[in-house]
Image (tube, helix red, strand yellow):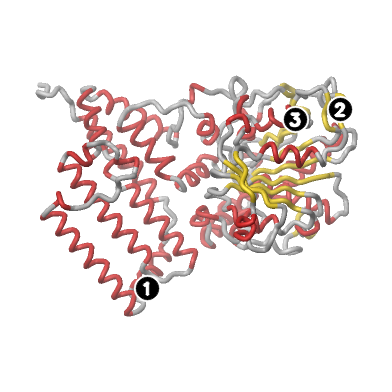
Amino acid sequence: MESTTGLRFEPMDMLARSEQKLIESLVRDLPLRGLDLAALLTAFLANEDTRGRLAALQSRFYREWLRLWTNPAQVPRTAAADRRFQSPEWDQLPWFRFLLAQYELFSDYLIGLAELPTLEPRLQRRLRFVIRHLVDALAPTNYPASNPEVVKAAIGSRGETLARGLQRLKADLARGRISMTDESAFEVGRNLAVTPGEVIFENEVMQLIQYRPATPEVFERPLLVIPPFINKYYVLDLQPDNSFARFCVERGFTTCMVSWRNIPPQLGHLSWDDYIAKGVLEPLDVVRDVGAGKPVSTLGFCVGGTLLACALAVLAAHRRSGVCSLTLLASMLDFSDTGEISVYVDRDYVQWCEREYGSGGVIPGTRLAAAFATLRANDLIWYFVVNNYLLGRDPKPFDLLYWNADGSNLPGPLYAYYLRNMYLENNLRVGGRLRMQGVPVDLSRITLPALVFAARDDHIVPWRTAYESARLLGGRTEFVLGGSGHVGGVVNPPSRNQRQHWINAELPADPDDWLAAAQMHGGSWWNHWSQWLAKRSGARRPAPASPGSSRFRPIEAAPGRYVREHC
């Protein structure tokens, strides 16, 4: 017999059990290892001062806990600005007010614990990261019975919201990732990656797209764009109103884009050197041929910029270039501070990757995407847990989140080499320490004019690290700082007139001195960059009537086959 409310509680129980599996997997994958736990225990008991501060923290926690249980109405709320707790029930209903106060008290205690021991910097950062994730995971909003908005929706729908959410959770668990957008709203080649062009070259790791000209005349020096190989290229060619590729051709640049392949198992042996040769040097020769032998402008985004700089250093070692300028977007050459992703990269993890993948194998793109999502867990995990599963709502269409879920598999040797030599040992910054393509690489031998862009709130490539990277180059280098984060800072079309950017022609040793003297400008950095590039792109000539060259004919229409392959 149905209850008087008509609400069936079985979906809530099933959803809670299924959600628990998701939370357990997230916590299990956090980067706190056995040796870390031993070091933490030692640090907490290391000296009398630390033990005293631990005792004081625990004493304060117990006092506040007793106060909460004896007089909960008098406990002040500290999360008033937290968007997770905006429902009026958190203030109006005693039970939910108690839950929130209890959560805030326990969160403050855990965060305080993370600051007590004196640890080496990497372990300290990892501890803070893990504690923050535990705090986020324990939020009462993440559970069906302790979120008032979820309870109201379940009662109002007679349990249908929970039933829908349970089906979404089961589907996401089966495919191994959280749905962050309405994926039916997008399709590559239909409303994403639609800037007209042709694939004019391909090899086993990439296709090269040449976009059709959008102006009667074009600059004589073409532009080669190297996007990150961790994701699909179309972050730079989303929809027409925010496509960087479209912006480039509309400014008269003959633009060629590398589209990375989603690596299949038979190519799991490929190395960093293979990607330099096949992903940069080969397409560079093609673009030079398309430009009738003129020097080529180059641009790299994120790890694509790291790979591009390595390739240019190889060319410099051979005393040949054929390149006239370098643009780096949110890229690291110096890895002294790698932001929050460094919590996953330590010597044990790198050695494990080398054992598992050093001689071959494929790193699933879904694994990398999941790790990056944990860096902004409340935005990229818990928001969707509540919206999709607990409230049974459809995620909203969002092109960047669709792209974010469309990752690429990587060859294991490339991944292991990148982690050890860049993230762990920071070898690239030291001239001659690494050999690539058989020659020592020295970034200071790259004497091209360069523009380096970073985003002020980037949690993957901290802007000060990108600034230090700019100072490793040997030519005249300009640094530009934009607002927003790693992707939002880069994908910022002028038409939307959003955010701001800072310009300073000098490059002092201290990045904060650079910022103090920089001039702020409203809106996108794209126009400034296009003016900078135009001065280095030679004369204008009539736009070519057909893509490619006599050697490199169109193979298929953009966006090509490779970008449509999924993990």
Which image quadrant: the C terminus? top right
Q: Position of residue 44 (x, y in %)?
A: 34, 71
Q: Residue at x 34, y 74 (%)?
A: 50
Residue bearing the label numbered 1: 42
* Label 2 to label 1: alpha-carbon separation: 66 Å
Quarter of image, res 18: top left
* Label 3 to label 2: alpha-carbon separation: 22 Å
User: In the image shown, does 6 or 28 lie closer to the viewer?
Assistant: 6
Q: Secondary structure at mark 3?
A: loop
Q: Residue at x 22, y 50 (%)?
A: 101
Label at residue 549: 2
Labels 1 & 3 near each other (Cβ < 8 A): no
User: Where is 437 relative to 370, above or below?
Assistant: below
User: In the image shown, does 292 or 348 lie closer to the viewer?
Assistant: 292
Is 294 placed left or right of 127 in the picture?
Answer: right
Q: Position of residue 428 (x, y in %)?
A: 69, 59
Mark found first going from the N terminus, 1 or 3:
1
Quarter of image, res 446: bottom right
* Label 1 to label 3: alpha-carbon separation: 60 Å
Is 467 placed left or right of 86 in the picture?
Answer: right
Q: What is the three-letter code of the residue carrying label 2?
A: Ser
Residue bearing the label numbered 3: 251
Q: What is the three-letter code of the residue carrying label 1?
A: Thr
Q: Position of residue 131 (x, y in %)?
A: 37, 56
Q: Label 1 neighbourhood size at 10 Å, few (<14), some (14-19), many (20+)? A: few
Mark found first going from the N terminus, 3 or 2:
3
Q: Nearer the viewer, mark 1 or mark 3?
A: 3
User: Where is 455 relative to 183, above or below?
Assistant: below
Q: What is the three-letter code of the residue carrying label 3?
A: Arg
User: In the image shown, does 448 or 499 lie closer to the viewer?
Assistant: 499
Q: Residue at x 52, y 60 (%)?
A: 346
Q: Residue at x 25, y 27 (%)?
A: 153
